[in-house]
Amino acid sequence: MFKKGYVAQGQNLLSKKDLKALKGQLTELFPSLDEKMLDEILPEGQAKVVKLDNRCLLYSCGDAAPAFFDSEGRGEFYPTLHTLWQFPHIMQELTIHPPVSKFVLNGADLMLPGVLVPANGVAGFGTVTKGQPRCIKIDGNPYPIAVGRMVVNQTQMEKLKGKGMEVMHVYRDALWAQCGKVKPNAGFSDEEEVAPCADSNWKPGAASAEANSTAEPTSEAPAAASAATAAPGGGKAADDWTQDDLLDFTFLQAFKQGLADDKALPIEASELYEKHMKPARPEGTTLDVKKSSHKQIGKFLNAMRKSKAIDVTEKKGVIHVSKVDRKHKVFVSLEEKFAEQVAAAPVAAVAAAVTPAGLPPPKVTAMWKPSHYLEPIWKAMGKKKDELYTWDEARAIVFSYIEQEGLGKPDGPIKMSDGLLTALWKTAGGQKKDQEWPTEVDAEQVEEKLEDRLQQHAAIDVAGVGVTTRKGAPVNIAISLSRKGAHNVTRICNLEAYGLAPEALGDELKKKLNCTVYIEDMPGKNVKEKMLQLQGHVDQEFAQFLEQRYGITKKFLEVK
């Protein structure tokens, strides 16, 4: 869209009302953008809009680089690369092989065969819809090279054929030039393609302009070399690592650091690769199993299985690591091979990246509230009827009353008194015809009648939330997957039982999962609970979030 130059036809300072409306539209499109970010990018009183001769609208702060653009002046907003380099995670992305970048840089739209499939398969792309704004990154570089809109839906995306994205703005186009021709790291050079580079410390104004790049020809080269080869602690240089060595090293680190015991087993192959092996790779390197001799993580794990270092199970094509022998000669050999690199690796950082939060799971306690029938017994024993009691506490109160009244003991026959009969047997309707009241009972009969006179409650103690008590038996958080119009939807109920407010949780998930969130009333009269709806089928991501954030494991979830 900006391959050729453009001409500004007019500009206006945004009013307070217009700026507020603009920010509302931007946060709706890009949920990860918060108010603080937008105030920094488009401060009140300085934000302006520039109209171009190609119908596009540019939004910026004073004379600063454009921050967002509306491609056709109809509310179809995209961040500029300059903005994305400041906030790389505000937009959903697609990752491509570095050689594919030269076609995108030359003005071509993105073809799906050039897109890297995530380790967990096409599901890793998230929900894909036509017209959805996304950015493009290359494998091994944290900064986007282009932004555009998807021209395929979820089903078409999974086929990985044909054109997938219409590119709207790309590195080296006229809009990039207007933003000062900055380069976020050494991977963005004058070469025909963008190269991998792990450097992610760019700040506005820190990158050199194109005009200055020739003035200091030697400054960028050493930086690039340093970024490409530096390894923490003086360890092995990045260029010296083969993909097979990286697989072995990260496999060793994963099971020696983040998965140091078997509590997390069995673990799915894709989860092991994405969440434990990739974070353990040495600084400045890129782990890509497809470039190794194994080609697939499953084949690599099967090779480890054949050596008897691990056990794996496979069901419906999904591989899980079920057992690990950390004292096996394979691990011993790898520790000897990578002794220097293991010593140089930032252990604390690796461990923090790959270990779960370690929060305790919710503690669920059944509690009981006495009904009005039991009030005389509770009053006689000096107890409050309106409080909640565990089963053992309620049982102890009744049997203490029985012993106090001289009616018997729990291990023997219990005589019936008018008070005990009224509390446990009699009903509001009185004695029915041919109905006889017992004169003597045992402890089991007393317990059975006591349970009928108690109202059950559930007290659920969630880490970081506290204890939430509700009437009725304990319930699981209910998750259902469905469609709403043309969109996939994940519906979540019973959050209040765990002390979680759907509104607050929705705000957090909106940024965490980068999805649209809806809050709806539950069906039925006098129902105060709310239903949380997330766009897309994100049940797995939601389950992972609950476990990491609150310690709520899948045991407490019910997926329909």
Image: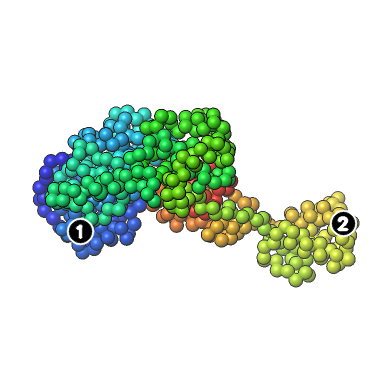
For disc 1, the neighbor class at 10 Å (few under 14, some 14 to 19, many from 20) is: many
Report the number of discs. 2
Which residue is nearer to you in this view: 284 or 539? 284
Counting from the top left corner in percent of width and height, residue 543 is at 50, 46
Q: CA distance from mark 1 to mark 2?
A: 82 Å
Residue beneath the point at 26% across and 44% down = 187
Q: In the figure, 294 relative to 396: above or below?
A: above
**Residue at which label 2 appears:** 411
- Quarter of the image where the N terminus is located: top left
Mark nearer the N terminus (1 vs 2): 1
In the image, 186 versus 467, the foreground residue is: 186
118 versus 306 height, above or below: below
User: Which quadrant would residue 282 be assigned to in this image?
Assistant: top left
Mark 1 highlights which residue?
61
Place of residue 345 in the rendered image (x, y in percent of width and height, measured from the top left): 43, 49
Secondary structure beneath label 1: strand
In the depicted view, which residue is nearer to us: 401 or 81?
Answer: 81
**Mark 2, residues whose alpha carbon is within 10 Å: few (<14), some, or many (≥20)?**
few
> Residue flagged by tag 1: what amino acid is it?
Cys
Which colour style is shown? Answer: rainbow
Q: Identify residue type, mark 2.
A: Asp
Q: Is residue 265 left or right of residue 421?
A: left
At 76% across and 57% down in the image, what residue appears? 450
Asked whether, in this view, residue 30 is left or right of residue 394, the answer is: left
Of circles 1 and 2, the one toward us is 1
Viewer can see residue 411? yes
Q: Residue 81 location, x and y as percent?
A: 24, 48
Do tag 1 and tag 2 residues touch (Cβ < 8 Å)?
no
Residue at left offset 23%, top offset 44%: 188
